[in-house]
Amino acid sequence: DIVMTQSPDSLAVSLGERATINCKSGQSVLYSSNNKNYLAWYQQKSGQPPKLLIYWASTRESGVPDRFSGSGSGTDFTLTISSLQAEDVAVYYCQQYYSTPFTFGPGTKVDIK
Amino acid sequence: EVQLVESGGGLVQPGGSLRLSCAASGFTFSSYWMSWVRQAPGKGLEWVANIKQDGSEKYYVDSMKGRFTISRDNAKNSLYLQMNSLRAEDTAVYYCARGGSRAYYPLDYWGQGTLVTVSS
């Protein structure tokens, strides 16, 4: 199984400031035949199901604000919220869908400072 | 509008069984891989299993293989999870989620979840 790790476990950022979350996979999730990274980011607000934000490591899901961006390749990935808004308070998870089981990272809790 | 509505959760004794259902609407159910994902109280997300459009391929996380069975009925636009030999550690909210037209796709729509509590 591919182990996913995230850092930090939690962070508090002032409104309007940048938040950066890191995700690392235990093996590469880059598929060489199509040069795609099989890595997604989800946002889960309290009491709600997860919501897909980013897939293929950097493609924003339809309707997701452009302050959310994903980057990275191979085994190291980053989710950036360029200007944190109050509605972005949530837990963020990365997930690899390169091979089953489709493992998730442990999550990063984002709060307002 | 895509909708996924889970049902069938509840309180069950250790060693018992439960069958979860997920009713899908707003999209062509038979065209998508489907998954179950669970979340223990206060914990992170754990992918459980997925199933191909025609049910011919199924994949499970090792810890649930042999106890859980995923299935679907495309005529009823429904996804199922049969859970046997339940343990306290299976207590979680179980989400149904839509995959893609191919096996290795992210989960783009999720239901609200159904809570399973395993306790005597």
Image: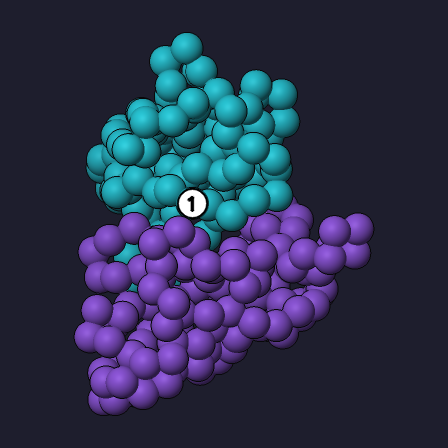
Q: Residue at x 48, y 20 (%)?
A: B30
Q: Is residue B116 above or below residue B69?
A: below
Chain B's shade in the image? cyan
Q: Amino acid at mark 1?
A: Asp
Q: Would you place residue A113 above or below residue A101 in this image?
A: below
Residue A65 lies in quadrant: bottom left
Colour convention of the picture: by chain
The quarter of the displayed image where residue B17 is located: top left
Residue closest to the eye, B4 or B62: B4
Question: Quick check: A65 above or below B110?
Answer: below
Q: Chain of mark 1?
A: B
Q: Residue at position x 73%, y 57% from top?
A: A35
Q: Name the residue nearer the viewer: B81 or A31.
A: A31
Q: Quadrant of residue A92?
A: bottom left
Q: What secondary structure is marked by label 1?
A: loop
* Residue that mark 1 sits on: B108
Task: Point out residue A19 in the picture as x, y percentages from the top left corner.
Answer: 38, 82
For the point 27% across and 70% down, which residue is it?
Answer: A88
Q: Residue at point 56% right, 62% down?
A: A57
**Chain A visual colour:** purple
In the picture, which quadrant includes the N terminus of chain A?
bottom right
Nearest the eye: A64 or B105: A64
Q: Is residue B74 visible?
A: yes
- Say whether residue A68 is left or right of residue B58: left
Identity of the residue furthest to the right in this view: A33
Residue A49 place in picture, x, y as percent: 29, 50
Q: Is residue A40 visible?
A: no
